[in-house]
Image: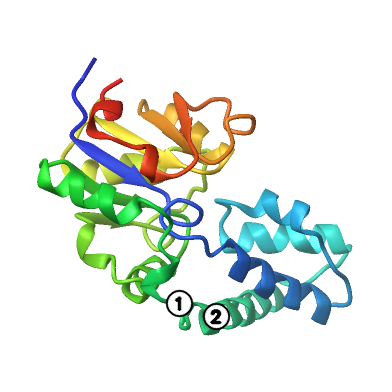
Amino acid sequence: MTTVKACLFDLDGVIVDTAVYHFQAWRRLANELGFDFTEHQNEQLKGVSRMESLDLILQWGGVTLTDAEKLDWANKKNQWYLDLVMQMTPNEVLPGVTAFLILLRENGIKIALGSASKNSKLILERIQMLSYFDAIIDGNNINKSKPDPQVFLLGAEATGCQPAECVVFEDAVAGIQAAKAGGMRAIGVGSAEVLTQADFVISTFEEMTLGRLNF
């Protein structure tokens, strides 16, 4: 088995959980357009780009908008989301994440972010984690959403590592699929019942060790 030289992390639901803020902002958009949607439906938006998420929500509400109107609403949603993000603190980093990133750095393992979010740098700044990452590939660098492997392939390239030398940490099915499509190993963060395609699943990073990386 190839030794792991880089770890690639999704952001939402892996490093920090901003899904609740996305849900609040998207739900406000839906309400202002005259309908509502559920938290269960919101799960389908994980790892999906902003405009694709908007298309799904409009489909659920049976609402048709012009491209210009879509852009306007997407920008409104993003501003509502950013207003919530600006209130974030380092206390929102998920359990065990900081200690694991420190362990990786101490052992010379590269760390990259692979996220669909266009606000990843702002979020990492708010939670004081920007300095941990050697590379950040996010919605500003990509034009294909997971399960396409683009975001992780660019992350591997940015760290100077081959896909086989990378392990991806993901909380979404599409993210696990993207890692696998890119020729990488994938560790799920969350439910083993949901993330069935992952090599294995952890509940929190408190369960991670260096030894578990090289499987």
Viewer-proximal residue among 173 and 17: 17
Residue 136's tag is none
As shown in the figure, which amino acid type bears the numbered disc 1?
Met
Q: Residue placed at 47% from the left, 56% from the top?
A: 116
Residue 191 lies, with reference to residue 71, above or below; the image says above
Tags 2 and 1 touching, CB below 8 Å = yes
What whole-number distance in Å separates the C-alpha atoms at marks 2 and 1? 7 Å
**Rendering quarter of residue 49:** bottom right
Which residue in the protein does label 1 denote? Answer: 88
Residue 154, how many percent across, how many down? 30, 45
Residue 84's tag is 2
Does dot 1 land on a helix, a strand or a loop? loop
Residue 203, how many percent across, how many down? 50, 40
**Rendering quarter of residue 124:** bottom left
**Rendering quarter of residue 36:** bottom right
As shown in the figure, which amino acid type bears the numbered disc 2?
Leu
Specify the farthest residue to the top. Answer: 1
Q: Residue placed at 23% from the left, 48% from the top?
A: 111
Residue 42 lies, with reference to residue 127, above or below; the image says above
